[in-house]
Structures are given as structure tokens and as C-alpha cells.
Image: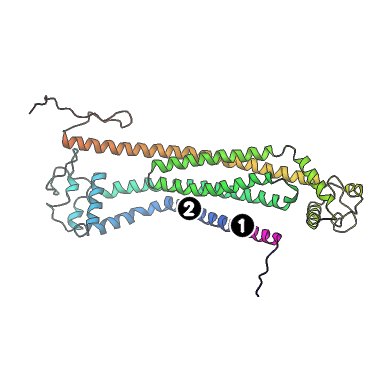
Amino acid sequence: MVTTMKLSLGSRCVKYLMFIFNLLFVFTSLLVVVFILEFSGGISGYVLRARASSIIQDKMRDSMQMYKNSSEVLTVWDNLQRDFDCCGTINASDWVTIGHMDANDIPASCCIDGTGVEPKNCSLTSAVVHQGCYNKFLSFVKSHAMQLGGVGLGIAFVQLTGIMIISIGTTIYAVYEDFSHFLDPSYFSPATLLIIVGIFVFIIAFLGCCGALRESTCMVLVFAASLSLVLVLELIAGIAAYALQDGIKNLLADKINATMHQYEKNDEARSAIDFLQSRLYCCGYNGYEDWEEQNMAIPSSCPSRDNKNIYVTGCIKHLSIIIHRSALYIGTGAVAIALIQLTGIMFACMLGRAIRRQKTERERRRWELRESLVNGYQPLGKSDPFTTFPVVYMSSEPLKNS
């Protein structure tokens, strides 16, 4: 009969704690790597914009040669020339020299007039022939490279706050774990909350990045709302950290006193007291006299390292200072990070508003183009898409009943 050896409860707890610690360490390391990559990508997007001119020009010339052979290239070039009111790379003659097309049969998208109607024939001598696409598209790419770099750096800093939150939470949790025998379980909740919030911040940062790149108003606003929720949770953690300081001294005194009574009876209590006294250089909960009052010998963990002097200060004073300091770290860290994330919420709302305006402008232009083709609608002057609403064209002639 084969028997399997089962680990004791304490050994299993240590095993699980080591697993969780290693998991958090790996996750935090990955966060740091992703932050470095995003930070590098943001800087590269800004620095490499100077090289964008040569890359764009070469790609444009290469794709012009495939205009008639690839439907995908044809669609891309037609959309480019329609949207930017341009023709060719440098000028319209590029379709003859590079694209090997006839001078009297260049793409019709080069000759679109103000009404948005494509002519049947477009040539170099047509009345409407736009300038080259290179300069217009280059300015567009350079301006958006700066925006892309800004978005990358912004999202990276939001993720950095997530890393900071996880670091603070794990540090405080580690301090609490060392003295868990003397603490109430409620003191673990603020640190645990910070760890969960830090992971949540890192995840929603990807949502904001995707929303910015896809120009999705919904995703950007969801990112802002999620970050607002995180802000509230962090403020709750900070308030809880300060609130839990009330009555902590009495709680610790009762816990240490109860553990001291079990020193000679319970191995776990003995290990906890020895660890506390040797780690904090203290003796008893108010002083070494506490052991004499209980008719117990002073433990070997009370004397100093040279075994000549006994620690005079009680452990309650040192331990309460550590807990107060840890609570202060949680509170100030949560408030400081919350202020950084408040700036991120403001920028996310501004970005969502800008995307919405851009989409409104696009829809307005499409409506005007459709109405000009169907009803001959022409806007009077330059209309403002944010104050002017589309007016349906009505014919001046009365309708005749058939």
C-alpha cells in the first residue's frame, strides 16, 4: 500500500503564500516591462516623425505602380485623394511618370470638384486637378505622430500608477504578515484593496489605449468612468487606513498580553513573541517587567545581541509606530496617486469630446455631399458643425398630385 505524505497546515500556508508572492512578483515585473515598452514607443513616435517624410514618399511611389493591378491599392489611393483633395505624390504628373498611365486618363479622384462629383474623364489638362498628396499627408502624419506619442506616454503613466499601487499594497501587506499574530484581520483589507485596485488600473489602461487608437468615444468614456471608480476606491482605502488607527494601541496591547500568557504553552505563541522582541528590539508589551509580573522567566529574545543588556522599551510602542507609519503610507500614497489619476480622467474626457467633434464634422460633410448630389443643396458660407444643424432641402415648386 502506497501512502502519500501530507504537508502540515502551516507548511501548506507557507507554500500558498510563496506562490502568491511569486505570482505578484512576476506580474509586477511584466507591468514594468510593458511600461518601458510603451514609454519607448511614445518617445519613438515623437522622434521618428522626422524620418516619416522619406518613408512616406517611397511608399507612395511604390504603391502608385500597383494602382491598376491591385484593387486594394486602388481603393486606398482613391480614398486618399478624395479625403485630402490631392493627386499623385508630388503632383498629378506622377501618375504618368511613375504610375505609367496616359496623361488623358489619370484617376478620376484627382478631379473631384466642390460638389463631390467624380468626372467621367480626368486628365492633366482638366479644370480641377489637385496638388500632390505628399505634403498634405506628411503634415497629417507628423501632427498625429505627436498625438500618438502623447497618448502612449499618458497611458504609460496611468499604468505606472497601477504599478505604484501594487507596490504599496504588497509592501504594507508584507509588514502586516510579519506581525499577523497580533493584528485583527480587518487590518489586511486596505493593503489587499490597493493590490486589487492596482491590477484593475493596469487592465483599464489598455482599454483607454485601444479607445484612443480606434477613436472610440465609448471606450474612452468607459476608461474615464472606470478610472473614476478606481479614484473612489483609492480614497476609500486612504480613509480606511487613517480610520483604523483609532484604538490600535489598545488592540495591540490586548493581543500581545494574551499571547504572552500562552508563551510557555503554545509553540506558535512562543515563536511570535520571540520574533517580535528580536525584530523590534523590545521586551514585553510595556517593558521587561511584564514577564516578572506574570512570574515568567525573561525570554532569550529579550537580551541584546551581546547578551549584556536587556531591552527596556516595550513592544507595544514599537509595533504601534510601525502600524501607524504603514497606515500613513497607505493614506498618502492613495491620495497622491489619486491626484495623478484625476489628471488622467480630465484628459480622457477631453479626448472623448474631441473624438465626438471630429465624428460630427465627418457626418456633416457626408450629409452636405449627399444633399448636394440629390437636391443641389449648397451651404451659405462656412457652417459651424457645433452650432448649425442640417436643414433638409425643400423645393420651391409645389408638389403636383399625380
- Relative to 106, is 62 on the left or the right? right
- Name the mark on residue 135: none
Neighbours of disc 1 within 10 Å: few (<14), some (14-19), many (20+): few
Residue 260 visible? The answer is yes
| 13 magenta-colored | yes
The residue positioned 28% from the left and 38% from the top of the image is 363
Quarter of the image that includes the N terminus:
bottom right
For the question of whether residue 282 can be seen, the reply is no
**Which residue in the protein does label 2 denote?**
38
Q: Report the predominant secondary structure element of the magenta stretch.
A: helix
Quarter of the image where the C terminus is located: top left
- How many discs mark residues in the rendered view? 2
- Please state the horizontal and vertical placement of residue 228, each as a whole percent of the image: 51, 39
Residue type marked 1: Ile
Bounds of the magenta segment: 8-20
Queried whether the magenta region covers residue 151, the answer comes back as no
Label 1, on which residue?
A: 20
- Amino acid type, mark 2: Glu
